[in-house]
Amino acid sequence: MSRLAQPEVVRVSRDQLSEAIAAQLARGFRLALVAAHEDGTAGSNASFRIVHVLLGTAGERVEVVVEIPRADAWLPTLAGISYPAGRFEREMRDLYGIVPRAHPQPYRLVRHGHWPTSFHPMLSDADPNPDFGSHAGFPFAEVTGKGVYEIPVGPVHAGLIEPGHFRFSVVGETIVRMYQRLYFVHRGVEKLFEGRQLADGIALAERISGDTAVGHSLAYVMAVEDALGIGVPERDQLTRALLLECERLYNHINDIGAIVNDAGFGVVNQHTGRLRETLLRHNARLTGHRLLRGAIRIGGADLVAAPDLDLLASVAAEAAELAKIATDHPMVANRLNTTAVLPPERARSLGVLGYVARASGMAVDARADQPFVDLGEGFRIVTAGAGDVWSRFDVRVGEIAVAAGLVADLSARIAALDATAPLTPSDGVGAGLGVVEAWRGTLVHRVEVGPGGVLTRVKVVDPSFHTWPGLGIALADTIVPDFPLANKSFNSSYAGNDL
Amino acid sequence: MTIDSVVVIVIQLVLAVAVTPVLIGVMRTTRARLEGRVGGGIGQPWRDLRKLLAKEPTRAPGSTPVLTVAPILLMTSSLLLCALIPLASTLALASIPGDLFVVVSVLLLGTVALALLGLESGTAFGGMGSSRHMVIAALVEPTVLLSIYALSVPAGTSALAAIVQTRRAEPASLLNPVSLLAIVALVVVVIAETGRLPVDNPSTHLELTMIHEAMILESGGRDLGWLELGSWLRLTALLGLVANLALPWGIGQDASPLTLGVGIVAITVKVLVLGSVLAAAEVFIAKLRLFRVPELLAGSFVLAFLSVSASYLVF
């Protein structure tokens, strides 16, 4: 299996940026990643290079690159033509200090209230220990009117979940507006990548979001291979696809139980919990790690043992039965149906990904759009049209069945091929892109490798970055007690988003 | 006679406090086993309670004495409830007003104490819990009143003890439509009043869906211990009332050791069995969307109303 197509690189000046991006968006491409890079040593000749990655639906990749001097670091905002661009710009402003001019939402995104305003942690000369203030205010747009009250929730929650702050403006029990404040688990992952050896990056990528170990490590490894021109044998490509589906299986099964549990139907959750544990133990036999860590390496992927197909088939069948029990229950069905609708047109304009997009009728899936291996007849994109909690539940149920089928297909194809000798990573410098359909959606890593096999920049875009804004839209006219249900049906990652 | 009444009241109180943690333990274990879990064991609620009551309460700065008084008020009202409702014997209650209206008022006292406590904490969750709690209380209390009232018509008195005695004397009346409608209505409101599924989920950790849990979210230590015990005692008292109205056998009618002993065993078994049935039923139901709870409660009110109307036709 050879490398994927080289991206089409478009170099533009600051003035041409909007037109260039608009032209690519007009081709039906979506903005998947925006990464800033600091070139040259800090001083008069230092500059920023901003790479906009756009992905098509037939494997096309376009990079729109713009260079700006560090001393005059601003960009014309793209928020008017692409919502995700507006969020990438806010992220870049907080981390690099590149100002988006005339941005409609000139608020901070990553930066917390206690960070000094001049502190941009991704800069090479950023103070490693700045003077953090003690007061971390966060003004929210207040909804005023008769009977409107606010409910602040989090960042510490009553359950064992990740930290995020939600502020609801509510009339009676109906949500008027929901604001979310994330980035409480910002660990500086992208900065941690810098200066690491290529092979050491895998362990870090696996830990970006614990439940997406395969997705992140695979995207990272594929980006490195793309940068250095390393070919991967077909057997290893198939193994990687199999690992991705194994990860999808245990997470989706966990989610269907968790969604139904939030409707108060705990018995299904107990059984999906049991199935998840069965799968985790199977993962441990497959790769030596319950979360499938350690199986993917640069240039290949290894399994310790062949998958137990009977076990996986029985788990998938049980999951389907549990899903049917849940949706056949009139009280559960009533809770899921028409709850927290994300209308298809809003889903498209926000650029949400994964099962959230597919539940709103968008057939976006990197396994079809940006494939690294032919998945064969067993693969199909599961979509639903209503965009409510039920649709997101149904998409997951459909994907469990597809994933179980794919594991069986892939396992047979792997068994038919002979193992090839592992490749030693070649030296060199370059930039590469890794695009993977992880269980939450399309995951993109862009890696730049410097001399000596050292990572100079890794940009990670978890699908949650694109999907989080959808939650606020879906909550309009939803009642407060249905929020946990809506949130669980999105199940966006905090760690993957906050980095 | 007075001494006998005091003995019966003391026995009922001790019995209620002793049985309640077991009842909660049995209910949780039933649910856990039916869901395929091991569960914390029948003794766990008692261990939790002992732990909480030994702990110093933490109260927010600027909080008023409501935080201290509300748990005591809830506890008092629950204990009064256990004293007034004929659990082990119908005897004691002749000399003090074990009247239907008194019982409902005492029940409401605890409800209001909880709601005030929720508001006192000053957080959005407490206020939200209190507002939901009061909405449900407003729909529940009339139904409690009405359904027991329907049963009081044949007895010709609103004293609970007398109602239970009359029903025990005429077992045939247990199966007539008036009685059945009233019991069904009562069961529904008892479920709502005690915060069980499908109205409230006692095992949730999701702040935004809570009703009862939201109000006690800010309490800790001893305060929380009393609140938990007080809420559980309400469950025991109300289940005991339903059990004795639906199946009045075994309840003692005087203070002789034998009948009292039988009464104690009978009510313990009845409450535990009823609790297990309730817990088992909870496995098969989900939580209603909040705005559909009033529909359920309105339905139970209609049943109670029909029952009252019918009682004048039948008797």
Image (tube, grey):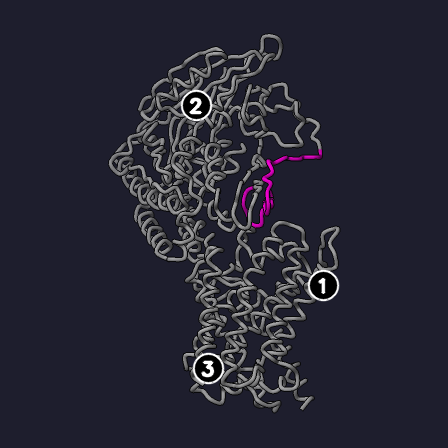
- Which residue carries the number 2 mark? A224
Query: Which type of secondary structure does the marked residue at label 2 adopt?
Result: helix
Specify the subunit that label 1 lies on: B
Please rate how many residues cluster around mark 3, counting C-alpha atoms within 10 Å: few if below 14, some from 14 to 19, many from 20. few
- Dot 3: chain letter: B
Find disc 3 in the rendering and name its residue. B312
| Residue A107 appears left or right of B58 | left
Callout 2 crowding tier (Cα within 10 Å): few <14, some 14–19, many ≥20: many
Same chain under badges 1 and 2? The reply is no
Task: Determine whether, in the image, residue A6 is placed left or right of residue A462.
Answer: left
Label 2 marks which chain's residue?
Answer: A
Residue with the most extreme top position: A45
- Whether marks 2 and 3 lie on the same chain: no
* Mark 1 crowd level (few <14, some 14–19, many ≥20, 10 Å Cα): some
Q: Give the left or right position of residue A316, taking residue B130 as reference.
A: left
Give the percent coordinates (x, y) of residue A298: 42, 26
- Stretch of the chain drawn in magenta: A134-163
Residue at image mark 1: B69
Q: Camera-side residue: A451 or B111?
A: B111
Spatial CA distance of label 1 from label 2 is 65 Å
Q: Residue at x 67, y 91 (%)?
A: B1
